[in-house]
Amino acid sequence: MFELIIFLLGLAVGSFLNVCAYRLPAGESVVSPPSRCRACGVRLGPVDLIPVLSYILRRGRCRSCGAAFSARYALVEFATGALFVWCFFVFGIGPSLVKALVLTSFLVVITLIDFDHQLIYDKVLIWLAGAGVAINLSFAYLPLWGSSVVLPVGPLDMLLGGLLGGGLLLAIIVVTRGGMGGGDLKFAAALGLWFGWQQTLLALFLAFLAGGFGGGALLLLRIRKRKDLIPFGPFIAIGAFVTLLYGPDLVAWYVRHFLGR
Ligand SMILES: [Zn+2]
């Protein structure tokens, strides 16, 4: 039962993230005006605002003019719902799930915008950093429950994580002479505040692993050409998501197998 509620919540949040990904780069407000059909301008009803429903009930078409909505909206929404349920399976109901869902929402919207525009917006990153600090600070005073709980991240650890995330990316930018952008640097620094230094190291390691495989696959499948810019933000997001769900397990496994403790 909870799975279904979390999934529906994911659909609703995914719908909002679609709006953010479309409007933020255009410099528009994400809360007003209400969404309209891009073909005929009619105001979208409740069913159209949840594209997954619109696809089931109206085959993804505008009820007024019949113009087709892009399938991407429904896909993003469905993916957000699925990621939310994944988080629920790991954490169960509790404060850790709230932290996971907030971070996941940021990762989705940053991925969408970076994929479209090769940009990560400061205004999104400021909210990301602020939310991470607020949640971590409040978690120091909350009883944490659930089927699994996130690691506590204290103020010093947040600071170290932010410096490590930003510093590592800065080193890479200097060495590769701009192979990555300032947005990636700030993104990694903001995630450092969420994760603390140890998990940040893991998240970035996983990001490079995903980037190596993913970038290679994009070139092989000729989705992107060699001289095209491949945005790195989505790979940082993948590394962060895996770290969010399995970071403590992965670190424990690494320590057991490679450091022999
Ligand atoms: Zn229309």
Image (cartoon, rainbow, N blue to C red):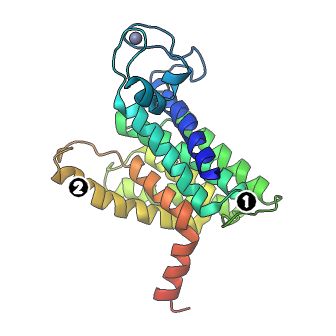
**Residue 97 horizontal/vertical position (percent):** 66, 55
**Residue 254 horizontal/vertical position (percent):** 49, 80
Q: Disc 1 on helix, strand or loop? A: helix
* Image-quadrant location for residue 211: bottom left
Looking at the image, tell me whether mark 2 or mark 1 is earlier in sequence order.
1
Camera-nearest label, 2 or 1? 2
What residue is rendered at 52% in x and 58% in y? 165
Q: How many marks?
A: 2
Disc 1 crowd, CA 10 A, few/some/many (<14, 14-19, 20+):
some
**Residue 45 horizontal/vertical position (percent):** 53, 17
Give the side of residue 228 with respect to residue 167, left or right. left
Q: Give the camera-side residue of 166 and 2.
A: 2
Query: Can you identify the residue that label 2 sits on?
Result: 217
Does the image show residue 162?
Answer: no
Q: Amino acid at mark 1?
A: Pro
Relative to residue 56, is residue 35 depicted above or below? above
Give the image quadrant in which the ligand numbered 1 is located: top left
Mark 2 vs mark 1, CA separation in Å: 39 Å
What residue is rendered at 59% in x and 65% in y? 197
Whether the residue under disc 1 has CB within 8 Å of ligand 1:
no
Q: Quadrant of the C terminus?
A: bottom right
Query: Can you identify the residue that label 1 sits on?
Result: 155
Q: Amino acid at mark 2?
A: Ala
